[in-house]
């Protein structure tokens, strides 16, 4: 006699749980999200284009003497449609004579995927060691070139923070860049 009420309770619980599933396995949307949102929306958001971003370099905490470390913040504002940034910006510094050197990623921070609506801002920071004027191991940088990951377009900005020390040679600057991060509120 007692087995019947337990069996009915188990059956009712099983039916209640299965009624929560829509039967699909598409994975679109998260629990509690309206239909069409969640991971499906993230996949459909295009990568940010540098041509749709307003970039501001500085103001910097510049290194004033050879061997000092300086920081140059870069802020970008999305002026286009909703887009995503993932990873680390592509950067290089170039001397007036034309020699250029890439700035590598700061390995201490993990990149995150950022979704930016129109008007949203993100930032990254360049940390560099100032080199000695005229030193063969320093790059007499005059131009900073910025590009977004997996995109070919770039923008150039004046580099007014002095020569960049090399890691043994001018072609390997003693400088790093952080991943993109949200800026503002």
Image (cartoon, rainbow, N blue to C red):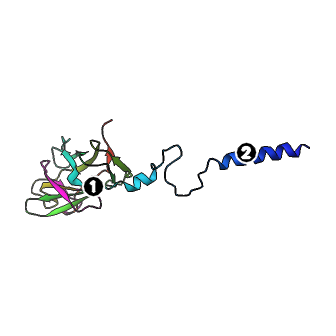
- x, y percent for residue 107: 35, 55
Secondary structure under tag 1 reads loop
Left/right of residue 54 with respect to residue 6 in the rendered view = left
The range drawn in magenta is 147-170
Q: Quadrant of residue 95?
A: bottom left
Identify which residue is drawn at 13% across, 61% down: 136
Nearest to the observer: residue 138 or residue 80: 80
Nearest to the observer: residue 14 or residue 119: 14
- Tell me if residue 166 is in the magenta stretch: yes
Query: Which secondary structure class fits the magenta region best?
Result: loop
Nearest to the observer: residue 107 or residue 31: 31
- Residue ID for mark 2: 13
Secondary structure under tag 2 reads helix
Q: Are marks 1 and 2 in contact (CB under 8 Å)?
A: no
Quarter holding the C terminus? top left
Left/right of residue 184 with respect to residue 142 in the rendered view = right
- Tell me if residue 30 is in the magenta stretch: no
Identify which residue is drawn at 22% across, 49% down: 53
Identify which residue is drawn at 80% across, 45% down: 8
Quarter holding the N terminus? top right
Instruction: Report the number of discs.
Output: 2
- x, y percent for residue 21: 61, 50
- Residue ID for mark 1: 89
> Between disc 1 and disc 2, whose residue precedes?
2
Left/right of residue 159 with respect to residue 114 in the rendered view = left
The relative height of residue 169 versus residue 55 in the rendered view (above or below) is below
Q: Residues within 10 Å of mark 1 (few under 14, many from 20)?
A: many
Gap in angstroms between the C-alphas marked 1 and 2: 52 Å
- x, y percent for residue 175: 24, 54
Tell us which disc is closer to us: 1 or 2.
2
Q: Residues within 10 Å of mark 2 (few under 14, many from 20)?
A: few
- x, y percent for residue 43: 40, 56
């Amino acid at each position: 006699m007692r087995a019947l009420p337990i069996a009915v309770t188990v059956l009712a619980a099983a039916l209640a749980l299965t009624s929560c599933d829509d039967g699909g396995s598409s994975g679109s949307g998260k629990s509690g999200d309206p239909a069409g949102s969640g991971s499906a929306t993230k996949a459909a958001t295009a990568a940010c284009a540098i041509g749709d971003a307003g970039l501001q370099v500085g103001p910097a905490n510049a290194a004033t003497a050879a061997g000092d470390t300086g920081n140059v913040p870069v802020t970008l504002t999305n002026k286009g449609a909703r887009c995503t940034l993932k990873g680390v910006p592509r950067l290089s510094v170039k001397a007036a004579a034309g020699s250029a050197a890439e700035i590598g990623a700061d390995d201490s921070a993990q990149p995150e995927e950022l979704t930016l609506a129109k008007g949203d801002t993100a930032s990254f920071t360049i940390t560099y060691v100032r080199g000695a004027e005229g030193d063969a191991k320093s790059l007499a940088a005059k131009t900073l070139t910025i590009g977004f990951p997996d995109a070919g377009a770039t923008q150039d900005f004046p580099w007014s923070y002095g020569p960049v020390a090399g890691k043994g040679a001018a072609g390997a600057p003693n400088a790093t860049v952080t991943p993109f991060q949200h800026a503002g509120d």
